[in-house]
Image: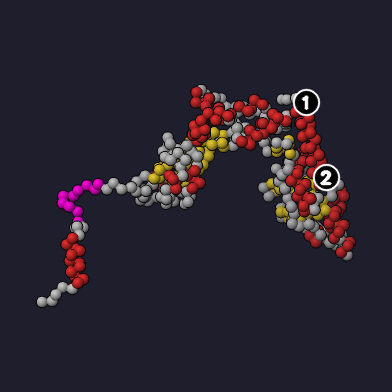
Amino acid sequence: MRLPKIRELREALTSFFTPPYTTKFPAVPDTWSGSYRGLPKYDGEACVGCGACVQVCPSGAIEQSDDRERKVRTLSVDYGSCIQCGQCQEHCITGKGIVNTTAYSLAVADVRAPEMREAVEKELTVCEACGAVIGCRDHLRWVMDRLGARAYAHPNFILLTQARLTDVAPARPKSRFRREDQMMVVCAKCRQKIVTADEFRLDHAVVKPLEITKITEGGVMLTVKNILEDKGVTVWTTTSEAKVFDALKTMADKGVGALVVVDKGKIAGLLSERDYARKVVLHGKTSPKTPVREIMTSPVFCVKFMTTAQECMALMTEKHIRHLPVVEEDKLVGLVSIGDVVKSVISEHQITINHLQDYIVGKYL
């Protein structure tokens, strides 16, 4: 008779002392009490709409959309992209606004099915001056509760507390900011403009459009848009294939010192009197035969409506140029020269001096 091998003895002992793989009969209900990190769910009461879950989601499964007209922020989770990492729950500022449940992954035929998304809507608070989003109302209340009595140092929180007690009608838009606008729900940018207008009597601190003039603690800074409103937006152009002589004739007829070179709707360069003086005769060329492309300045430095006069002057000084095309949405909308910029800087300095004088002698709104 053959004796059993050591391996066979080990397998026999293991089988003898190992519990059976089959369930008992009759069946016993599963009493497993362990945890499982499954699909995340929003708690409409605990969520304050801060959007922290959107910022930390590594797979981009959580989206945020703000409807300013309805004043509603929607936070939604796409279960098709969710990797159930738990980052949303870990970084939730309230600790329970969104939690990972023990729900298992879904098996659906269409990824656009309603059960593949989880969403919550929160009321938005928007600036009563410019319409910018300040935050969700519940989020502001959460911050206010954490600040305690210190929250009453901010007008927005004072008005939020008042809204808890009674209905507060929204402020009516005005042509410009006034001192009474201090007690209005506004964003940080508008509040800074209200305070500055109150201190320095900036009568032109209009509400709409808010971005025409930049206002700082030291006074007002005129922008390219202000310069063009005073100068005009007419821009004379030429093409790179045109002859230099024809371009010079256009300059003389229109009384300008530079032309923007435009090809197929795009800015290709800039032709100025300085380019002609330095690049034609001195190089043995003649203006009737030389195309503009051979002497034009390229590439061209451009500015936008909201570029300040101070920024234009700094750019002109650094790059040794005298003209700056103005471009908005890839379209040529104007041209400013060094003379326009100097005139604007002198004007804004005079405005600031007048405001400071009025402030010193006690003239208020």
Tell me if I can see residue 27 in this picture: yes
Figure quadrant of residue 269: bottom right
Question: In the image, is 81 to the left or to the right of 25?
Answer: right
Residue under circle 1?
A: 361
* Amino acid under disc 1: Val
From this view, report whether residue 127 is shown above or below residue 102: above
Residue 182 percent across, percent down from the top left: 63, 28
Residue under circle 2?
A: 339
Residue placed most toward the observer, 239 or 51: 51
The quadrant of the rendering that contains the C terminus is top right
Question: In the image, is 134 to the left or to the right of 16?
Answer: right
Q: Which residues are magenta?
A: 22-31
Residue placed most toward the observer, 260 or 150: 150
User: Which residue is situated farthest in the bottom direction here?
Assistant: 1
What element does badge 1 sit on? helix
- Contact flag, marks 1 and 2 (Cβ < 8 Å): no
Residue placed most toward the observer, 60 or 238: 60
**Residue at 28% in and 46% down:** 33
Residue 323 percent across, percent down from the top left: 79, 49
The crowding category of the residue bearing disc 2, from other C-alpha atoms within 10 Å (few below 14, some 14 to 19, many at least 20), is: few
Residue 119 percent across, percent down from the top left: 44, 41
Tell me if I can see residue 262 in this picture: no
**Residue at 76% in and 48% down:** 314
201 within the magenta span: no
**Residue at 47% in and 51% down:** 58
Question: In the image, is 219 to the left or to the right of 11?
Answer: right
* Amino acid under disc 2: Gly
